[in-house]
Image (cartoon, rainbow, N blue to C red):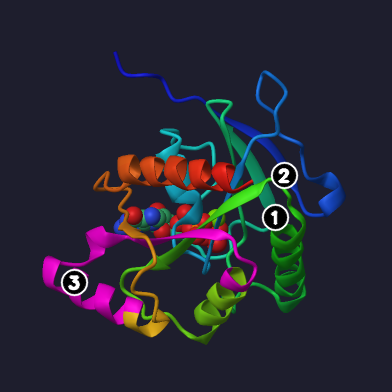
Amino acid sequence: MKKAVQAKFIKTAILNKDYPIIRSPSGDILPEVAVVGRSNVGKSSLLNHLFEAKHLVKTSATPGKTQALNFFSLNDQIAFADLPGYGYAKVPLSVRKEWGPMVRSYLESRESLKLILFLLDIRRIPNEEDIQFLEWVLYHEKALILVLTKIDKVNQKELRLNTTKILDTLSLMNLHHLYYSVPKNRGRKELMIMIQEALNDEDKQE
Ligand code: GTP
Ligand code: MG
């Protein structure tokens, strides 16, 4: 019988002092995986899909849906943080101004953070903002998995071509990457395996 997936919503927070401490039933602090990327790239949808839950994480066709940090746990083993996306001009400047420091402060201070899922839309060549963000994450030496999303929107030829263009732009040919599609149900198993492996590697290094 297939093992049931149990995802829980833990908390919404903006300030460091409000971040939850997420523990396993035996009291250990859970390793945390953060999902980052441009607005509308599919961060919240990927988490729902990973959790096999339709509406646990709020998603929207309008970019700028997620405006705070949202914390979840999966099977009492892994914590997840859904972050607001960057780069959406229509979100009021006053709101956007708070997102940069909010995301930065989370990434810099969250001790349980072990892995970053960096999402890029397969149809878009990364721009300066994407590159800057990625360089900054790599500078902090966080483990990172590149997830190319919405692959149902391209054909096989475009998939190959765009992958090359994206990886060339990032000049990170040896970065772990995988393809994801929510409607096509692609990527879930591979991503779970990659997450487990990355967390195991992190564990060994400590
Ligand atoms: P913000 O919270 O604004 O940063 O956006 P987000 O990255 O969380 O994106 P969200 O998950 O809310 O999805 C944005 C839109 O993309 C929604 O309309 C989703 O239905 C759609 N979407 C997400 N994943 C996929 C996918 O794999 N394929 C397709 N075709 N659409 C997707
Ligand atoms: Mg979102």
Q: CA distance from mark 1 to mark 2?
A: 7 Å
Q: Quadrant of residue 185?
A: top left
Of tags 2 and 3, which is closer to the observer? 3
For badge 3, the amino acid type reads: Arg
Reply yes or no: does residue 153 show up in magenta: yes
The residue lying toward the viewer, choosing from 64 and 115, is 115
Query: CB atoms at circles 3 and 1 under 8 Å apart?
Result: no
* Residue wearing tag 2: 12
User: Which residue ends up furthest to the right in the rendered image?
Assistant: 17
Magenta part of the chain: 138-167
The residue lying toward the viewer, choosing from 78 and 63, is 78
* Residue wearing tag 1: 68
Badge 2: how crowded within 10 Å, few (<14), some, or many (20+)?
A: some
Return the mark for residue 160: 3
Q: CA distance from mark 3 to mark 1?
A: 34 Å
Give me the residue at 32% from left, 57% from top: 178
Residue 199: x and y in percent read 52, 43
Give me the residue at 87% from left, 48% from top: 17
Quadrant showing the N terminus: top left
Q: Is residue 146 above or below residue 51?
A: below
The residue lying toward the viewer, choosing from 68 and 196, is 196
Query: CB atoms at circles 1 and 2 under 8 Å apart?
Result: yes
Quadrant in which ligand 1 is drawn: bottom left
Whichever of labels 3 and 1 marks the residue nearer the N terminus, that label is 1
Q: Is residue 177 above or below residue 73?
A: below
Q: Is mark 3 within 8 Å of ligand 1?
A: no
Residue 42: x and y in percent read 44, 57
Q: Is residue 5 visible?
A: yes
Residue 24 placement, left or right of 149? right
The residue lying toward the viewer, choosing from 90 and 31, is 31
For badge 2, the amino acid type reads: Thr
